[in-house]
Amino acid sequence: MYPSNSRQNGFRDLSRSPNGLPVFSSSIHEKKLRHAKASSWTISIYLPIPGFRNRHFHVIVPNLSLFHRFTLSHFSRRRGTLVLLFTCLSIVFTIFAIAQRFRAREKQWAAPLFPGEPPTLVFGREDLQKIWRWEIQSGHYPSSRASTPESDRHDSPPFNPALSPRKVAKIPSRFRPPGAAVGETIGHGPKRVYLDVQARPPDVAYPPRPVPGSVADLDIIMDLCDFPSKYVRDCLEVLRIGGGLDNGARVRRGNVDDWRYIYLEDGQVNNQMEPVASPGGFDPIIRPSVSIDPNVGLVKKPRTEWELPLRLPPPLEHHPYHTLPSTCDPENPRLFHMFWTGPFTDKPYLALLSFMFTQNIRLHLHEDEPDAHACRPQFWLWINPGPAAAIPNPNALHDMFEQLKSNPWASPFLHPRFKDVIKFKMWNTTEQLDGVPEIKDEWRVLKDTLFNSGGHIISVHHDDSTSSKSVTASVNPGGANAKSNEDEMVNRLGSKSADSYDRLSVILSDMARFVLCHRFGGVYLDADTIFLRDWEELWGWKGAFAYRWSRLEKYNTAVLRMNKGSALGSFLFRTALKNGLDFHPMTVSKYTKDAYLEGLLLRLPDALFDSAWLNTEYYQRDRPPQPYFTEFADFFDTPLQNSAAPQALGFEGFFRGAYSYHFHNFWWKPFDPVRNFPDLGPNFADGERIARLNNDIAYNTTHTTQETLRKVTEDKRDLDWATVLKRTFEAYIRGERPNMYGEWLQW
C-alpha cells in the first residue's frame, strides 16, 4: 500500500495525498500553505472552478484541529470535546437566528409539527360542515366576503337568506388553506337599500337616531377599517359620515356613496328557489378529492377522541325587520350583559350612564305614550355576590339588593323609571353552567380547575370538612404572601390597585361572557367599557362578532356578540370542555382557527370599540385619531399639552364615530377625583350625601362639603377626559342637557 504521509506532530502532511502524489496545482499554492503560521485559527481551502484551469475559489474556514488542541490543553479530554461541540452548535444556532430575523417575508422555515400550542380540534369534518350550514341557513351569516372552501362534489352550496342574490360570497385567503378552491353561498335574501343618513335642516344640532331595523354592512366596514392597511382616524371618519354623526358639520364635498355602510332590507326571503348543484360543492375544510379518511386535513387534539356526531335543532328562519309581527325579534333579543364582582363603584355606574345617554331606551317619552314601550334594549348587570371562588349563600339575592340600595353608586338605577331597561341579576356559577346543555353533565369533573386562563390554572378546592363557604386556592409558588386574608387572591372582591388585581374574577368573566350570550343571546361588554353611540345597526347584523386584539389577528372578547343557542356556541362549549374550559380570548382564537370557523365569529377592527389601542402600542402615531392617547392612563390623567381638548370638544370630540370605548382596567382610578360621588341632582340627593360623607371619612377631611364644591376655584383647572364624560352623562340625568341625539329625559 501507499506509505503514510504524516508529520512528526501526528497530523497528516497536507502537501501530499494518501497515495503520495502532490496535491498542489501550482507552486504559489504550495508556498502559501507551507509558510502559513502553524498557530493560525483559520485555514485556507482552494476549490477548483469548473471551466477555468489553474483557477481556484479561496475559502477560509475555522482550523478545527487547532480548536481541538486548544480545548485539550485547557480542559480535560472529555470536557474539551464537549466545549468544542457546544461552540459549533452555538455558531450554527446564531447563523440560523440571524437568517430568521432578517429573512425575506416570502421565505419561511418549515413549520413544526405543532406550531405554537398543540391543536384544540375535537370535531370532525361532517360536524364542521353541519355547523357552517346551520349558521348560514339561520341568517347568521350576512357576509359576502367570508364564505367557505369547497371540495365535496356531492353537495350543493347552501342558501343564504341574509344575503342579497346579487352578491356572491367568497372566502378571503386568510380563512382558507393555501391552494383551496373557493366555495360560495347562494344569496336569496331581500334586496339591500343603502341609506344616506344625515341630519336634515333645520334640525342639525344633533344627529338623527338610526332608522329602526337598519343593518350595518360589516363587510364595508372591514374593507375601510381593517388594520394594517387602514388608519383608525380614517375609519372613524367613515363611521361618522356613514352613520350621520357629523350632524351638519360635513365638510367633505366629494361623493361619499362608498362610505354608506347602513342599509335596510327591502322585500322578502325567496323560499321558492330550487337547489343548485355546484361542481365544487360545499366543504368547510379542504381535503383531497380521493380519500378514505373523512377527516383528512384536520389536526385533532392529541390523546382525545373525536366528538360524537353533533345534534343541532332545526335552523332558525330569517325574518327581515319589516316582516316582524312586533318591533322586537324574539330570536334576536337586544340584551347588553355586563359582569361585576365586588362593591359597586363608579365604573359600572358610568357604563350604565353611558348606556342611558346613547341607546334608544325611549326615556324621552312619557310612559303613557304608545311608542314609549316599543322594543328597547335592556342592560343586564350580573353581580357576583362574593369572591369569584366563593359559594353563594341562600340569602345571596336578598343581600345583593340590600347592598345595592345602600350603595350610592348603584341605588339611582333602582329608580322605577329605569326598571324596564336596567336589570340587576345575580351570578351563580353552578346555576349558569348547569344551564348550558352542552356541558351541564360534564363540567363538574373540572370544578377544581375551573379558573383556567390561557392554560394557566388556578386550582380552587372546596373544603367539605368545614363550612360550605370555605374555599382554598393553590397558586404557583414563589409569590409574596398577602398581608391579610382579604387581599389573598381567592378572597379578593374587585381590583383595588394594580398590585391587588382580582385575577380570579377576570378569569371567571372570560367564561361568563360566553355562557350569557349562549344562554340568553345579545352582546357582552366588559365593565371598563363606555357607550359612545346607538347600536341599532349592529343589532341588525345577525352574525356573531368580537373585535381584533390590537395588531394581532386574534380576538378580544371585551365586546362579544353571539346568538342564543347557536351552533357556533355549541362548538365553542364542547371544544372548551375538552380543553379545560379555557375561554381566554387567545385560546378561543385557536379554537376557531383550528376548526376553520373564524368566518363565523367576525373579528371586527378595534377602531369600532377600542380606538386608542394601536396608538398605545406605538402604531399609527403618525396619524392618530382624536383624542390622541399614548397610553390608556391618558383617559384619566390627560397630558397637560392636550388638556384643553376635553372641555373644548366635550363628548362630541371623543372618538366620534366609534360605538364604544374600552379604557382597559384602571378600576382603582376615579373618573372625577374632585367630585368622586354620583352628582345626579335632587332626585338622588340622599345617595349623593352618603357618597360625600364616605369621601370625607376616607380622606379624613371636610373639604368636600357642598358649599366648598360650589366654588369653581376648588375644581381642577384642566379637566380630564374621564371627568368630562362623567359630568356630561350626569348632566343628562339632572335634566340640564339632552342626550347625544337631542332627547330630554322625562320623569
Image (cartoon, rainbow, N blue to C red):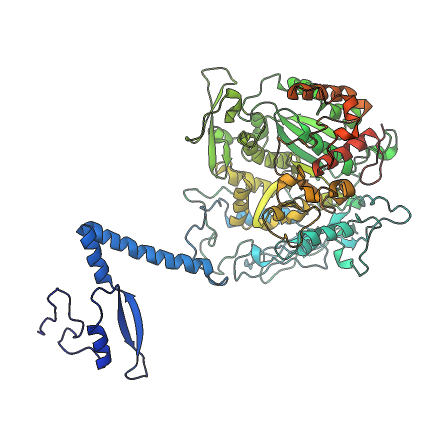
The furthest residue to the top = 466
Instruction: Left or right? Give the position of 153 relative to 679.
Output: left
Give residue 264's position: percent from left, percent from top. Answer: 78, 50
Give residue 590's position: percent from left, percent from top. Answer: 52, 46
Q: Looking at the figure, which quarter contains the N terminus?
A: bottom left
Identified at 19% across, 73% down, the residue is 34
Residue 309 versus residue 693 in the image, above or below: below
Give residue 344's position: percent from left, percent from top. Answer: 66, 25
Residue 614 versus residue 491 in the image, above or below: below
Instruction: Left or right? Give the position of 123 relative to 204.
Output: left
The furthest residue to the right = 202
Residue 482 versus residue 76 in the image, above or below: above
Residue closer to the observer: 69 or 113: 69
Picture quarter containing residue 695?
top right
Give residue 284's position: percent from left, percent from top. Answer: 56, 53
Residue closer to the observer: 507 or 482: 482
Residue closer to the observer: 119 or 399: 399
Instruction: Left or right? Give the position of 428 relative to 694.
Output: left
